Image (cartoon, rainbow, N blue to C red):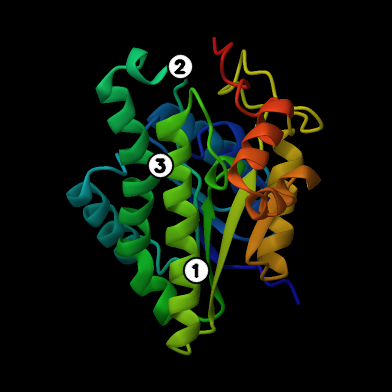
Amino acid sequence: MNMFRDRLALVTGAAQGMGRLIAIKLAQLGCRVIVLDLDAEGAKKVAQEIKALEGEAWHFAVDITDIEAVQRFHRRVNLEIGRVDLLVNNAGVVFGGAFESVPLDKHMQIFQVNMLGLMTLTHTFFGDLLSGKDTHLVNIASAAGYIGLPFGSTYAASKWAVVGFSDSIRLELAERGLDHVSVTTVCPSFVNTGAFDGVRPPRFIPFLEPEFVADKIIEAIAHNEAVVREPFMVKAIGFLKLLPLTWSDWATQKLGVTSSLMRWK
C-alpha cells in the first residue's frame, strides 16, 4: 500500500531549493501537493512542474508571518481543496555576519520566518492534522539548533527554538494519546542551496546536496522517524554537550564550527 497516495501535502518555501524537491518527490509518490511560497511566480512554476509529471498541485503566495493571511489561506484550502494530511514547514531565511553588523530588522526577520511563521502554520493547520488519519508534521530545523553558531547567532537561536518546539509538540501528542499524528524534526548541516554561499563548512562535515536531504525527509515520513540528523558528524553533537564547557568549546573551534560563517558572501 502506498501511504502517500491521495494524501494532501502542504510544503512551505517550495518555490525553490529543498522545498521544491520535497514537493515534487511527494507528488511523484502520489500526494496531492499545495506549493506555498512568498514568491508567487516561483510557486506557480513548481506546481506546473508537478502537473507536467501528471501530479495534482495548487500554488499559493502567502506571507507566513501574517497571521490573518495564513488563517484566510487555511479557510480557502479547506473549502476548495480539503484537509491537509502532511504539513512540511520548510520556509526559512538566513543572514550571517558579526552580530552588530547585521541590521536589527534582519535579525527580526530570521526569527519571524524561521520560528514564528512555522508556529503560525502549525497552529493554524493543527486541527487538520488532529482530525485526520495517520497525519504528519515535518519541521525543518538545522544542526545549528543543537550548537552555538558564531556569526549566525539569531539563525541558530531560531533553529534551537524550532527543535524545542517540535520536541515539545511530539511529546505533548504522545501524552494526549494522539499517536495518529507524527512529528519529524530535520536537522541537517549546511545544504548546498545557494543560501550559504561563501560559508566554509566545519571539518568532516561537507555541504549536503538538497536531493540527498529531501530523500532523507521522505524516508523519515515513511518510517515515522522523530529526528533526521545529517551527516553523521551531526549525530555526534550530543556527545560534545556531555563534555565540560571548555572542552566542547575547544572541540567546536578545532572542528571549524566557530569560524564557518566568517567568510559569508
At label 3, which amino acid type do we have?
Asn
Q: Nearer the viewer, residue 42 or 80?
A: 42
Q: Residue furthest left?
A: 68
In space, the residues marked 1 and 3 are separated at their CA atoms by 22 Å
For image coordinates 66% across by 37% down, the residue present is: 189
Comparing marks 1 and 3, which lies closer to the viewer? 3
Q: Secondary structure at mark 2?
A: loop
Residue 232, numbered circle: none
Of the numbered discs 1 and 3, the one sitting upstream in the chain is 1
Which quadrant of the structure image shows residue 17? top right
Q: Residue 96: x and y, percent? A: 47, 20
Type of the residue with mark 2: Gly
Residue in the picture at 35% in, 12% down: 101
- The local secondary structure at tag 1 comes to loop
Query: Of the residues shown, which amino acid type is indicated by label 1?
Result: Asp
**Label 3: which residue?**
114
Residue 196: percent from left, percent from top: 59, 22
Q: Is residue 193 above or below residue 161?
A: above
Secondary structure, mark 3, is helix
> Considering only vertical position in the picture, is 146 above or below 168?
above
> What's the mark number on residue 85?
1
Q: Which residue is mark 2?
A: 97
Tell me residue 133's x, y (percent): 52, 81
Quarter assignment of residue 82: bottom left
User: Which residue occupies 56% across, 40% down?
Assistant: 144
Structural crowding at the residue carrying mark 3, measured as other residues with C-alpha within 10 Å and reported as few (<14), some (14–19) or many (≥20): many
Decide which of tag 1 and tag 2 comes sooner along the chain: 1
